[in-house]
Image (spheres, rainbow, N blue to C red):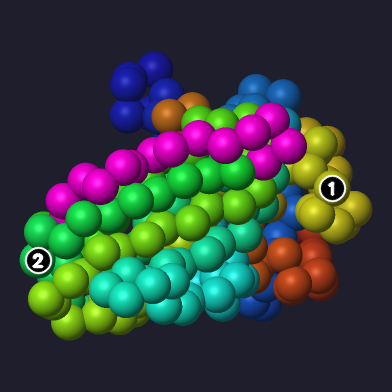
Amino acid sequence: MTLAAMVLAQCFVMTDPTPGWKQITLPSSSPQLAAPEGYEQFRTSDTVVVTHELTEVLRSAHRAAPGRNAFDFTLPPHSTTVTLRFARSLDSAKVDAVVEGPRGRQTLLDGRRVSGASLSLPVSLPDAARAVVTVHHHLRDAPVLESATVERRVVPLGAGDFPPQLRLDNSLYLRSPGGPITVCQRPRQPLRMTSRALDDAFVRSAPLEQAPTR
């Protein structure tokens, strides 16, 4: 069997024409099936990156003191990164950032000057539940937060906020826009989804067909 034929033998087509979540039982010969990047998808036993948007995580944005604006975020369990995007460059303003949780408090930035319009902060404090970012904008325009995201890494089988219908063992879940989708063995494929996709509770089991050979 040629290499191309071996690769095709690990590919299948999900033909369900309807949009929404599809539950695909993983074949024993292909336990790491995934669609190409760009689809919301996860395997229940593997880590998935879940993205939370601004309206879900922003607790408040307020003037903390003259020349200082603070942005206060809720961090879901297992958060790994907080990313802020401002309407314009911070123009080398000083920025403080801290995270807090049951195990204490950790400083991420202490007066660091930031020149761009975006800021990405890794969260390493276990069980961190809150992040506060303060921009010192003396002699500059007040910062305008355009968007923010929090990413977390979870294994769906053990995640309490995943509904039971999205936690069947030995499954690939794929959020489809409708129409056929080819899934292949992709052990290195990043698995990503948005938290809002969990609100889409309707799931259909979808069979697979072997991808046609060429």
User: Is residue 44 left or right of 83 when viewed as pictured?
Assistant: right
**Dot 2, how many residues are within 10 Å of its Cα: few (below 14), some (14-19), or many (20+)?**
some
Residue 30 got which mark? none
Residue 137: percent from left, percent from top: 21, 70
Pick the front one: 44 or 195: 195
Q: Quadrant of residue 203?
A: bottom right
**Dot 1, how many residues are within 10 Å of its Cα: few (below 14), some (14-19), or many (20+)?**
few
Q: Quadrant of the N terminus?
A: top left
- Residues shaded magenta: 101-114
Q: Secondary structure at mark 2?
A: loop
Residue 212 within the segment the image draws in magenta? no
Question: Would you place residue 40 above or below residue 148 in this image?
Answer: above
Q: Which residue is mark 1?
A: 160
Q: Quadrant of the C terminus?
A: top left
The structure residue drawn at horizontal position 80% and vertical position 54%, both measured from the top left corner, is 161
Kindly identify the amino acid type of the residue bearing the numbered disc 2. Answer: Asp
Q: Secondary structure at mark 1?
A: loop
Pick the front one: 129 or 214: 129
Question: Would you place residue 120 above or below residue 33 in this image?
Answer: below
- Mark 1 or 2, closer to the camera: 2
